[in-house]
Image (cartoon, helix red, strand yellow):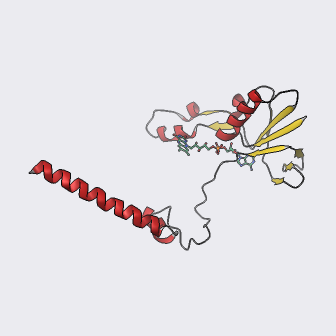
Amino acid sequence: MKKVVILGAGTGGTVMANLLHKRLDKKDWSITVIDKDNVDYYQPGFLFIPFGFYTGDQITKQKSKFIPKGVEFIVSEVERVDPWSNLVVLPDGKKITYDFLIMATGAEIAPEKKAPGCVACLCHTSVRGFYQTCGGQQAGGVAGRAGDQDRHAFQRRTHRRSS
Ligand SMILES: Cc1cc2nc3c(=O)[nH]c(=O)nc-3n(C[C@H](O)[C@H](O)[C@H](O)COP(=O)(O)OP(=O)(O)OC[C@H]3O[C@@H](n4cnc5c(N)ncnc54)[C@H](O)[C@@H]3O)c2cc1C
């Protein structure tokens, strides 16, 4: 029996669990999903809460509802992966072996952490700050030129309309 372990039951992990469950022969494969909690937030819905289109309850579901029957779901933080031994280690010391590992643990926003070469990241206060301090000068230059072209096109159009 071969074993697939999926870390994260968010968008990516849930999609993979459902696809593999359909496609892999259950006689030969087992699938385990591990996530630190069982609460799913429909992230695009966050944008609509301030405007009253959704309430918090409407965008909150249980992750286990999206995991197909026959797939094991473990609710636990993943402490570390030992790729040399094909092991996932949980905080209680439990070790889970795998033949194939899918990491779908998403991204976390960490503005306090600076990428290498980023001298004084101001991304969270000003988009211009990103281009000036985070190695994006070249991209900033391109964006600047595109801005000028847009402005000139806009001026030509408004000039034509008014004359
Ligand atoms: C406000 C907002 C609006 C968005 N709107 C759209 C949109 O309109 N269209 C669109 O396509 N996308 C949208 N997105 C982006 C989309 O939600 C994400 O790209 C997508 O959820 C990423 O999927 P993922 O599987 O990589 O991560 P996630 O869905 O974040 O899943 C990661 C999972 O890993 C788990 N995890 C992390 N670390 C550990 C650990 N150490 N141990 C155990 N479990 C762990 C987490 O609990 C989580 O369940 C939006 C995002 C936000 C925030």
Q: Is residue 73 above or below residue 158?
A: above
Residue 12 horizontal/vertical position (percent):
66, 40
Q: Quadrant of residue 116?
A: bottom right
Could you tell me which residue is drawn at 47 percent across and 38 percent down?
48
Residue 138 horizontal/vertical position (percent):
46, 68
Residue 49 vs residue 62: left or right? left
Residue 69 vs residue 120: left or right? right
Could you tell me which residue is drawn at 44 percent across and 62 percent down?
127
Q: Is residue 55 above or below residue 144?
A: above
Residue 115 horizontal/vertical position (percent):
61, 67
Quadrant the N terminus occupies: top right
Circle count: 0
Could you tell me which residue is drawn at 78 percent across and 47 percent down?
77
Residue 113 horizontal/vertical position (percent):
62, 65
Q: Quadrant of residue 144?
A: bottom left
Could you tell me which residue is drawn at 25 percent across and 55 percent down?
153
Residue 113 vs residue 67: left or right? left
Ligand 1 in which quarter: top right
